[in-house]
Image (cartoon, grey):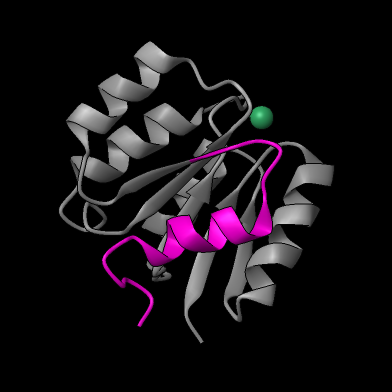
Amino acid sequence: MKKVLLVEDDSVTRTLLKRMIEGFEYDVTEALNGKIAWETLCSGESFDLVVTDIMMPDMDGRELLHLMRVDDRFYEIPVVIVSGELDKNMLSRIAEEYPEYTRFQEKPVNKAALYNAISSLEDPLS
Ligand SMILES: [Mg+2]
């Protein structure tokens, strides 16, 4: 089973997303913020996909994405950004910087749309 690292500080949203992603038959590991997610990645556990919120304490989703994209170990892991705060300028900057393996999903998350976003990432989960 493919492994997803789910990064979200809000427990209600995290539980909802976990259920959705498990419904796609992926194994989900939860992280409560970017810092914990980064530590989890660096611990050596491998993941096929990261689904992350943007607005989080300690380390936000942008910083996590940046750390991943400049690190040889993680730069090819696809990332789906899930956020309620979809600032258009910020998103266009992220999309320009990291076009290949990054998708966006606006909150509230629709299950079919999330599945499409995951599926569109060049078949990373097959
Ligand atoms: Mg948040």
Please name whichever residue, 95 or 43, is drawn nearer the observer in this view of the structure.
95
Residue drawn where x is 35% and y is 61% of the image: 120
Residue 28: percent from left, percent from top: 61, 69
Which quarter shows the C terminus?
bottom left
Residue lying at the far bottom in this picture: please name it: 1
In terms of image quarters, where does ligand 1 lie?
Answer: top right
Q: Which residue: 37% across, 67% down?
A: 44
The vertical placement of 89 against 77, above or below, is above
Above or below, 46 relative to 87: below
In this picture, residue 123 sits left or right of residue 116 = left
| Residue 125 sits inside the magenta stretch | yes
Q: Position of residue 66 (x, y in %)?
A: 29, 33
- The residue closer to the viewer here, 117 or 61, is 117
Image position of 28 (left or right of 49)? right
Count of labels in the image: 0
Q: Is residue 80 left or right of residue 11?
A: left
Which one is in front, 45 or 74? Answer: 74
Looking at the rendering, which quadrant does residue 94 occupy? top left
Residue 99 inside the magenta-drawn segment: no
Classify 55 as above or below 116: above
Name the residue located 36 percent from the left edge and 12 percent from the top edge: 89
x 61%, y 60%: residue: 112
In the rendered image, residue 116, in percent from the top left (x then y), is placed at 48, 60
Q: What x and y, as percent, mark residue 3?
A: 49, 74
The magenta segment: 105-126
Relative to 50, is 4 above or below? below
- The residue sitting at the right extreme is 12
